[in-house]
Amino acid sequence: MSHYSLTSTTSSDGLTLVARDYPAAAVPGMAASPARLPVICIHGLTRNASDFDEFAPIVAGLGRRVLALDVRGRGESDRDPDPDHYNAQVYADDVVRFMDTLGLPQAIFVGTSMGGLITMTLAGERIDRVAAAVLNDIGPWISHKGLARIAGYAGKRVLPASWDEAAAYLKSLNAGAFPDNTDAEWDKWARRAFAPDGNGMLAPRYDPDIAKGLQEGRLKGTSPGLRRGFRRLAGTRPTLLVRGALSDLLEDRQCAWMRRQAPAMRYAEVPGVGHAPMLTEPAALDAITRFLATLP
């Protein structure tokens, strides 16, 4: 498995933002890795860059540099003292600044859930920075059912006393979406999602205030800006939609709407999984590998 280093930048309002940087592997018969478009992976609302700790090395092994971001308020990135800054517009601005710091004019984006919302927001305003995109179980029209479920747990101050307790908690929230997960996989999820808090407990690796907008009803199922961003993205850039067959955030109706709006968009469905695929499932990984193979 590829190793990564941590790289960071400073946001326009002074926060330190961190990413895991996976170097491109040398692949015989392929162009030199610096010439290939890098991949930027962006996680979901309460998640962090470690969600890509299996997916990112695989993509790096295909000869592309991979950057897995910790969005502000998550993982190793600073928490924001102003909760109003936890929104897709600010996140998209952070991504542009991050790319500028690293000298990356364009990238291929892989956005899971909130990461896909950030990608569509970016496409609506700075499509020049987006070479192509994978939207993981997300679109510009989100199911209220899924939003209500996420609002039920996001931002809650849960402090498990052990890793077993943390794993059991995550299983209670996600077993419907991942019915085949083993105990070892729930433990792995727990170690991605929690960290010791210094007081003998475990704490979520995110600022509880990230969910304030959702809890206050300010995050809606759709918006004109998101729909515009999606149309610009899927209408002008290679786009792949990956959907969990059991998803309650991107249900059949929303998925069908997206495919009507963007008939050229590629599509892959992951059986037996809900929101959101980890992208290492065979159906997802095969589709993404074939998609990346078409890109410079």
Image: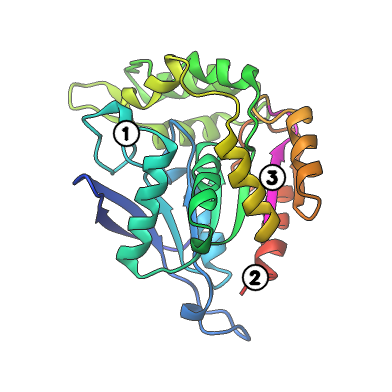
Query: In the figure, is residue 126 to the left or right of 261?
Result: left
At which x and y percent is residue 117? 53, 40
First in sequence: mark 2 or mark 3?
3
Query: In the figure, is residue 28 to the left or right of 81?
Result: right
Magenta highlight: main SS:
strand
- Residue at 47 percent of width and 16 percent of height: 217
Is any part of residue 81 visible from this angle? yes
37 relative to 242, above or below: below
At which x and y percent is residue 164? 42, 22
Mark 2: few/some/many CA within 10 Å (<14, 14-19, 20+): few
Residue 75 marker: none
At which x and y percent is residue 57? 50, 60
Q: Nearer the viewer, residue 174 or 18?
A: 18
Q: In the rendered structure, which segment of residues is drawn in magenta? A: 238-247
**Residue type highlighted by circle 2:** Leu
Alpha carbon separation for disc pair 2 and 3: 17 Å
**Residue type highlighted by circle 3:** Val
Q: Nearer the viewer, residue 213 or 232?
A: 232
Secondary structure under tag 2 reads loop
The residue beneath circle 2 is 295
First in sequence: mark 1 or mark 2?
1
**Residue type highlighted by circle 1:** His
Magenta stretch holds residue 123: no
Residue 85 marker: 1
86 relative to 157, above or below: below
- Residue at 38 percent of width and 62 percent of height: 99
Is any part of residue 279 visible from this angle? no
Secondary structure under tag 3 reads strand
- Residue at 52 percent of width and 30 percent of height: 186
Alpha carbon separation for disc pair 1 and 2: 34 Å
The answer to whether the residue labelled 2 contacts the one labelled 3, judged by CB atoms less than 8 Å apart, is no
